Amino acid sequence: MILLRKKRITFIVFSVFLSILVFTLIKDKKEIVPTVSLPVSGKTIVIDARTWKTR
């Protein structure tokens, strides 16, 4: 029969949480991939801030 004391249970729970934390930190390494969200890459965009009345 396995004796479970409070100290041993605390150690087991702490070990499980620590291993989950380490696993998520190792797994969370993200690669940065350059992307362009606009379909007008390489073109000049002119933004006119005038109102319709001043045109």
Image: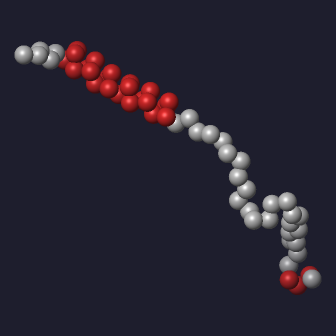
Whether 27 is drawn above or below 34: the answer is above
Which of the two residues, 46 or 40, is positioned nearer the viewer here? 40
Q: From the viewer's perspective, is 26 left or right of 10?
A: right
Give how far across and how far down residue 30 sits, in percent: 58, 39
Residue 21 position in % (x across, y down):
42, 29
Residue 46 lies in quadrant:
bottom right
Give 10 or 22, whichever is nearer the viewer.
22
What is the x, y in percent for residue 16? 32, 26
Colour scheme in use: secondary structure
Q: Residue furthest left?
A: 1
**In x, y percent, where is residue 53?**
88, 84
Residue at image position (80%, 65%) is 40
Numbered circles on residues, count: 0
Name the quadrant of the N terminus: top left
Q: Quadrant of the C terminus?
A: bottom right
Q: Residue at x 38, y 25 (%)?
A: 19
Residue at position x 32%, y 22% from top?
14
For residue 9, side relative to residue 41 (left or right):
left
Q: Residue furthest bottom?
A: 53
**Relative horizontal placement of residue 26, taking residue 18 as reference (left or right):** right
| Residue occupying the point 16% across, 15% down | 5
